[in-house]
Image (cartoon, rainbow, N blue to C red):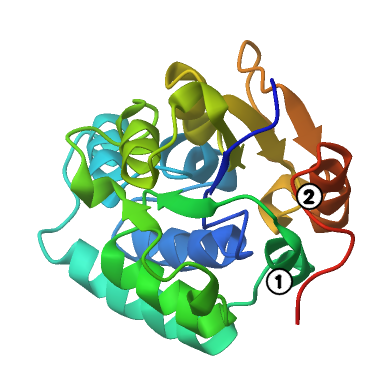
Amino acid sequence: MSAAELVIFDCDGVLVDSEMLSAGVLMAMMTEEGFPLSQEAFRSDFLGRSFAAAALRAKERFGRPLPEDFEARYRDRLFAALAAGLKPMDGVAEVLGALSVPFCLATSSSPRRLALSLHASGLASYFEGRCFTASEVPRGKPAPDLFLHAAARMGVAPAQCLVIEDSELGVRGGLAAGMEVWHFAGGCHVLAGYRLPGGVTPQRVVAGMPELGAAFRELGLSSSAASP
């Protein structure tokens, strides 16, 4: 692509290293409720999905729905864990501070979870007024709706957008939107074995924030050093 005019970041697994923390909370709670969930099942049915979509997959897998109050109890336990232990991805502040083109965030997380994640990780100031969630569009990832919505709100054509995603659904959604997509492979869940399935092919794979920063500099999207 020619130089991107907008970088669209996913949040969980890209900006914050949250996926294994989320997996631990969810797998423990589902086991307590008689829905034993392996890490493989978490990756295929929950990673990168909205809770509503993930709950539907759980119903299909187990033949019965989750309890009506499960989502509220899960969010309460998860948010407590995020507030206590969520960390930004190593090096992300330096990468964001050095970007010389506009950037924003597009996530399947709920607005409440997103706000908690950004504040707990210290990244809220970078994305003030530039956050878009699946609650704002008819269809979440892997549909292109959220990415197209973010691009439209930021005033940039889809073909001039670069998406940074860690999950299959996010990569599919960015590609469906006609954008260039890079797979960020620096999160703990990727190091623990998560892989994109065959046929899901991003334009580039970056192993972590230092490599992402170098790639941005290579394309003239950032300065050589982060601003203070």
Please tell me which of labels 2 and 1 falls first in the chain. 1
Whole-percent x and y of residue 44? 49, 34
The residue tagged with tag 2: helix, strand or loop?
A: helix
Picture quarter with the N terminus: top right
Give left or right: position of 50 versus 20.
Answer: left
Cα separation between marks 2 and 1: 21 Å
Q: Mark 1 points at which residue?
A: 93
Q: Reply above or below: 125 against 50.
A: below
The residue tagged with tag 1: helix, strand or loop?
A: helix
Residue kind at label 1, given as amino acid type: Ala
Give left or right: position of 25 versus 76.
Answer: right
Q: Look at 72% across and 65% down and name the residue there.
A: 92
Q: Look at 34% across and 25% down and name the residue there.
A: 143
Q: Reply above or below: 134 against 57.
A: below
Q: Mark 2 points at which residue?
A: 191
Q: Return the residue nearer the eye: 162 or 135.
A: 162
